Image (cartoon, helix red, strand yellow):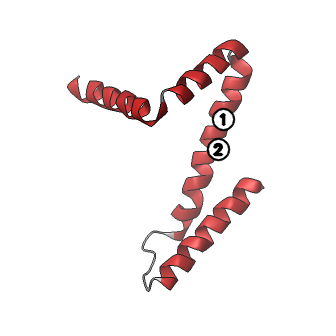
Amino acid sequence: MLMACYVVMMFGLSYLLAWMGGQRVLAASWMLLAYPMVRYAIYAAIAMAAATLVHPVLSWGVYFAAGSCGDAGWFRLKNRLRIRRYVG
C-alpha cells in the first residue's frame, strides 16, 4: 500500500512539474506506473530471499561491505563488471 502511494505520488508529481515547466510527459502513462512497481517488487523479493535463505552473519557482512565501499568503490565495481562483460 505504501509503495503504491509512493508510485502514484511520483506519477502525479511528474505531470505537475512538466505542466509547471510548460512541457509534456512523452512516456506512456502505464509505463510510468508499472516500472517503479516492478522494480520495487524485485528489490523486495531479493531482500526477502536474502533475509530467509542467507545466514544472518553473511547477510550482515554483505551489507557492511556494500555500505563501507562508498560511491567510489561502487562505481569501480560497476566499471569492472561492465568491462568484464564486454571483453568476453
Task: Determine whether the residue tagged by mark 1 lies in a helix, strand or loop.
Answer: helix
Rate crowding at label 1 as few (under 14), some (14 to 19) or many (20 or more) other CA atoms within 10 Å.
few
- Residue 61 vs residue 41, the one in the foreground: 61
| Residue name at image x 42 percent, y 73 percent | 26
Q: Quadrant of the N terminus?
A: bottom right
**In the image, residue 87 above or below residue 43:** above
Quarter in which the C terminus is drawn? top left
| Three-letter code, disc 2 | Ala
Residue 17 spot, x, y in % from top left = 52, 77
* Tag 2 secondary structure: helix
- Given contact means CB atoms under 8 Å apart, are the residues at marks 1 and 2 in contact? yes
- Residue type for callout 1: Ala
Q: CA distance from mark 1 to mark 2?
A: 6 Å
Count of numbered badges drawn on the protein:
2
Crowding around mark 2 (Cα neighbors within 10 Å: few <14, some 14 to 19, many 20+) is few
Q: Is residue 14 visible?
A: yes
> Which residue matches tag 2?
41
| Position of residue 63 measured from the top left corner of the image (x, y, whole percent) | 61, 25
Q: Which mark is residue 60?
A: none
How far across and down, in percent of the image, does residue 59 sit?
A: 65, 19
Residue at 54% across, 55% down = 35
Looking at the image, which residue is at 68% across and 26% down?
49
Which quadrant would residue 43 be assigned to in this image?
top right
Q: Is residue 55 visible?
A: no
Quarter assignment of residue 11: bottom right
Q: What residue did someone put label 1 on?
A: 45
